[in-house]
Image: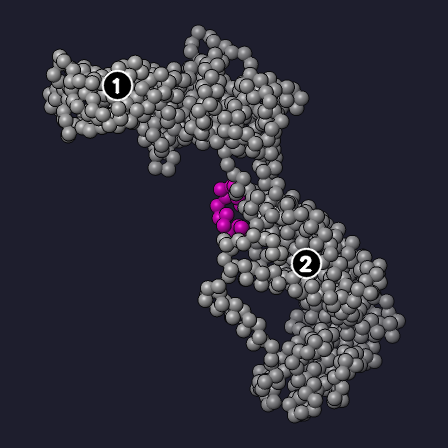
Amino acid sequence: MSRQQRHDARVPIALAVLGWLAVAFFVLPIMALVLRVPWSSLSDVITDDATTEALTLSVFTSVITTVLAIVLGVPLAWLLARSNIPGRQFIRALCTLSMVLPPVVAGVALLASLGRRGVVGEILDDWFGVRLPFTMPAVVIAQLFVAMPFLVLTVESGFARSAGTVEEAARTLGASPWYVFTRVTLPATQPAIVAGAVLTWARALGEFGATITFAGNFPGTTRTLPIATYLALESDIDDALLISMVMVVISVVILVALRGRWVGAIGGMR
Amino acid sequence: MRPFSWVLLAGVVLAGCSAGSQSDGQPVIFAASSLVDVLSELSAEEAMPFSDVTLSFASSASLAAQIIDDAPVDVFISADRAQIERLRRAGFSDTQPKVVARNSLVIAVEAGNPLGLAELRDLSRGDVLVAIAAPGVPLGEYSQGMLSAANIEVRPVTFEADARGVLAKVALGEVDAGIVYATDAASASNVDRVVIPEAEAVNVEYVALDLTGGSGAGQDLIEFLTSDTGRFALTNRGFLLP
Amino acid sequence: MGWRNWGYEVSLSIDVKRRIGATQLNVQFTVAIGETVAIVGPNGAGKTSLLRVVAGLISADEGRISWDGMVWDDASSGEFSPPEQRPLAYVFQDYALIEHLTVGDNVAFGLRARGVRRRRARERAQEVLDVVGGSDLVERMPSSLSGGEAQTVAIARALATEPTVMLFDEPFAALDASARAHARRLFSSMRSLSMARLIVTHDAVEALTLADRIVVVESGSVVQIGTPSEVLATPRSHFVAEILGLNPLSGQLRGDELSLGAMSLTVGAHGVDDGEVIAIVRPRSVSLHRERPEGSPRNVWRTTVEAVDRSDGRVRVQLGAPLPIAVEVTPAGFDALATELDGDVWASVKASEIVVQPA
């Protein structure tokens, strides 16, 4: 804070104090992490095959998850925001439940449904010989399950806000509902979709509990960066700190690259 | 600033302070996860001096890290002698560590043992999905050590973070077998155990370290575990005695 | 698309009922090709809902809508054409331009939606913009347009698809004076296009000057249909009179004596029973004088001038007690009066110029 800022009488002091307290609350642990990390061994950890393998897997799976979340989540958000399906509130609650579940429980739920003995998983195994647990798709499924609600909720509020006479005008100009959706509604909702995608990606990148429960931990196929970090905590804390710094750096780079332009839409403003 | 905000701030600050000190009166035990059942049972039965003890369970490595970071604790029971050595190197060397229990390894299989697994070598069969603990965690090291000593190569589908993770995968039927501590397999309801002779060579020791500097309380707790009552509770849960 | 006239009048036929909230819309009328019909009525009368039913944005509960024999909406048979299948265009009150498209792409939108190739649609958009006086707007974004420009673009976008029915919702409501003038010129030039036009408005001057016929809607129902002169001559509701600036007065009628509380007037021949009535005093039928006029002793009263409004070559004078009505005189006549605001004047109205109808 510099002295040159004008006296802004409209910000209540109580808000300012609590606000800065919140800033400290978020920044302090990250700063502490930065200070504690043994930077001298950074190159060892980053060039370590196990780390790069986990990093590659994490980036790859979280990007796939984000793409799938958009493909599935945008239509779901549309249904929730625009359609008249009965029990919309209830469906919304169901579809975002995985957000509040402890991730490990989310993982058990996935095993119970898609696992080798799961309701659907058993059929997949018997009929198609497909076994999801301990595979890379399982990592994506676990991430999708806990992270997609972030996209759905963000995009749903985007759809709700972009509703207006513009879409009706487009209909009267001869556009079919699908044409209106792709040419009018989607572009108008784009900021919310990008914001939701960023949130989803961030959540997917950091996913641990559901992943280790549903997908297990195997180098190269299911050991993501958070799992590698957790296991490193058991043997070598310094390694764990360095690996987590890699995640911090990636996240900061992405968020800064978006320059708050899209991220601003997360909070609902334009 | 309005009085209201001072109250809020004061609340935040006070709440932050009061969580720190623990050691006034109530003894605190940090113990390896595999001791959850036996120690909780002793505490619940109000067996002196365990009646009002505070228990905290986690992996031995993270508990050791917390202790080095000044967590208020009276007794640390580790499943891994390496963590005790780490603490002693960090200056916690007033008293001698004491072995209070031992554990062994078994193969956990689905209830009923549908694949008919009978020996350690069966884990290398192509049709058997296996989970073992990850290298780096004590159980993973013991498991790997046992397999190497027996010269058996196993290709697990997953390296779990701890014994509970391995057990969960077996209990849910996602894998056919997993190597766990004997005590964990004993406490799990829907898995069966396959006892393996190779495990006899594995010496899993639970080492207790008194962190009170030898002043009464810590010593009492450790002695209680080696008393008849403590030994009975431990053997009841599948532990071996030192 | 060519235009067929097989000896009968091509028209938009509207005969629908539709419940919207507390309002029961229940209207029947037709709009012929080439005709402009204005729908006037108070807020909440269901005017916009009527446009939405015609556009197919909502469906009718009962009745049918057809154009040139083609059924758009028939509640009894269940036939219903969605908006994109009706050859119409709808200019919304807020113009509803697509924010992320340039003006050119907005105008080309309807053609693109109907499968016209991008290049051809762009050319056509430019042509239409040229016609409506928006040539230089092509590359602009909607957020940078003024209200008048936005309306010009909205109209261009509607015209680009060559609709046979055009719907306008309050086209002048949001415009300033100069934009209004441009819009009026645009509307009069559109009169030569062979299409049926339906304009919703609450502005009497617009309705009178733009429309061939006026449909007055109150509480969802049609209370009067007629040419502007018919509606002016015999406004059939309190609202019509008020909206047309016609000084509606509520009073008691006994014989030819109209009692208005503070004063009474004598009315001419009428077929109305005694009791509560609405009397209409047309602004131009009232004369103002410096001195008490000679001759007719009835319907002359002394009053004050509360406000004077000179515009469009007319002078509207708001009178004070005992009868606060608006009157209209020629500028020459007003100058001859040589009065001041708050100055006393004498007002007179012929009995035959007062129209009464049951309340």
Look at the image and give the residue range highlighted in magenta.
A79-93
Question: Of tags 2 and 1, which is closer to the observer?
Answer: 1
* Whether residue A136 is visible: no
Q: Residues within 10 Å of mark 1 (few under 14, many from 20)?
A: few
Residue at image point 76% right, 86% down? B93
Which residue shows up at 62% across the image and 63% down it? A24
Q: Position of residue A240 (x, y in %)?
A: 75, 66
The answer to whether residue B152 is seen in the rendering is yes
- Residue toward you, B207 or B167: B207
Q: Residue at x 52, y 68 (%)?
A: B9
Q: Indicate the chain on which mark 2 is placed.
A: A
Q: Which residue is at a point 20% across and 22% down the rendered structure image? A: C345
- From the viewer's perspective, tell me whether residue C236 is left or right of residue B218: left
Query: Are the residues flagged by discs 2 and 1 in contact, CB closer than 8 Å?
Result: no
Can residue B131 be found in the magenta stretch? no
**To which residue does mark 1 refer?**
C338
